[in-house]
């Protein structure tokens, strides 16, 4: 089984955005309703979640996820780690701690934000996790190889991940050619495209399309989309062949 399920495809504020009545936020098309960005990858019998933001609990319930092998974190911003406490349900279901992989800098923030989970005298109901520091070197989850992909989120280094022939990258506005070379040959590339106008820390639509052209995957999906991108139905018509706007609950089976 090789698949990727889009748990969320929105920005840190989600879509609709609180207090906004623009045509996207007011749309009745469910594809314009976007939770914080995250994906679930099933590959060779392993179940991997990339990022656990504030919507993590609802995303797990909605997709009826009952087991995960690991959570990979791209970086430490709240829309990517704000739901880690809810791994408690998996602790109970699986009878074990959850493995979390991230750079040491990111794990330090997790340990600060969830200090009660690492205290010497822990309450019995706190989330249990095993943290695994990684860098840009490939690593394994069981027999599954994961290749980190370095990108820059303005001045913040972040990681995307290649799992077999699937690559997921979010929250970047710059990537070096050496990292692009690691992505080539994938069947599916997922990359952030915040909006059409320039942004200090995220790819625009044009920049995301440029990366897709360089990588030349069989299919590409855009994620981490803001309400400023426009209506899903209209933007899709502007995209080249083989490129799609992702939306929440979309499942791609390879």
Image (cartoon, rainbow, N blue to C red):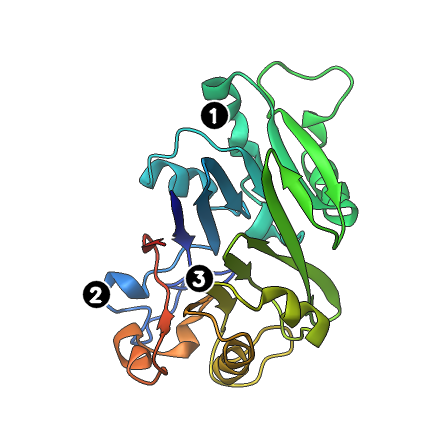
In this rendered view, identify the residue nearer to me: 87 or 178: 178
- Quarter the C terminus occupies: bottom left
Mark before the other along the chain sequence, 1 or 3:
3
Report the residue at 44% width, 38% height from top. Answer: 57
**Mark 2 in CB contact with mark 3 (< 8 angstroms):** no
Mark pair 1, 3: CA separation: 24 Å
What label sits on residue 28 in the rendered view? Answer: 2
Report the residue at 39% width, 63% height from top. Answer: 15
Report the residue at 63% width, 74% height from top. Answer: 173
In this rendered view, identify the residue nearer to me: 35 or 16: 35
In this figure, which residue is indicated by the disc labeled 3?
10
Q: Is residue 206 above or below residue 92?
A: below
Mark pair 2, 1: CA separation: 32 Å
Label 2 SS: loop
Report the residue at 49% width, 26% height from top. Answer: 90
Confirm whether residue 47 shows in the render: yes
How many residues crowd around disc 3 within 10 Å: few (fewer than 14), some, or many (20 or more)?
Answer: many
In this figure, which residue is indicated by the disc labeled 1?
89
């Amino acid at each position: 089984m090789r698949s990727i399920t889009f748990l969320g495809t929105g920005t840190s504020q989600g879509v609709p955005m609180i207090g906004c009545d623009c045509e996207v936020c007011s749309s009745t098309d469910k594809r314009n309703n976007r939770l914080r960005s995250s994906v679930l990858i099933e590959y060779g019998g392993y179940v991997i979640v990339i990022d656990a933001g504030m919507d993590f609990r609802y995303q797990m319930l909605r997709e009826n996820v009952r087991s995960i092998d690991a959570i990979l974190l791209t970086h430490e911003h709240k829309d990517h780690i704000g739901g880690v406490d809810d791994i408690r349900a998996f602790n109970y279901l699986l009878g074990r701690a959850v493995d979390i992989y991230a750079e040491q800098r990111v794990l330090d923030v997790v340990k600060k934000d969830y200090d009660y989970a690492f205290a010497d005298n822990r309450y019995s109901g706190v989330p249990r996790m095993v943290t695994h520091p990684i860098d840009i070197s490939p690593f394994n989850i069981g027999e599954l190889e994961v290749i980190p992909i370095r990108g820059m989120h303005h001045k913040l280094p972040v990681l995307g991940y290649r799992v077999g022939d699937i690559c997921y990258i979010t929250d970047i506005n710059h990537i070096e050619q050496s990292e692009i070379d690691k992505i080539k040959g994938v069947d599916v590339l997922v990359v952030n495209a915040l909006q059409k106008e320039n942004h200090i820390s995220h790819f625009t639509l044009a920049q995301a399309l440029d990366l897709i052209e360089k990588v030349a995957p069989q299919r590409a999906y855009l994620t981490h989309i803001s309400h400023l991108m426009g209506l899903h139905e209209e933007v899709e018509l502007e995209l080249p062949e083989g490129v799609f706007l992702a939306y929440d609950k979309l499942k791609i089976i390879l």
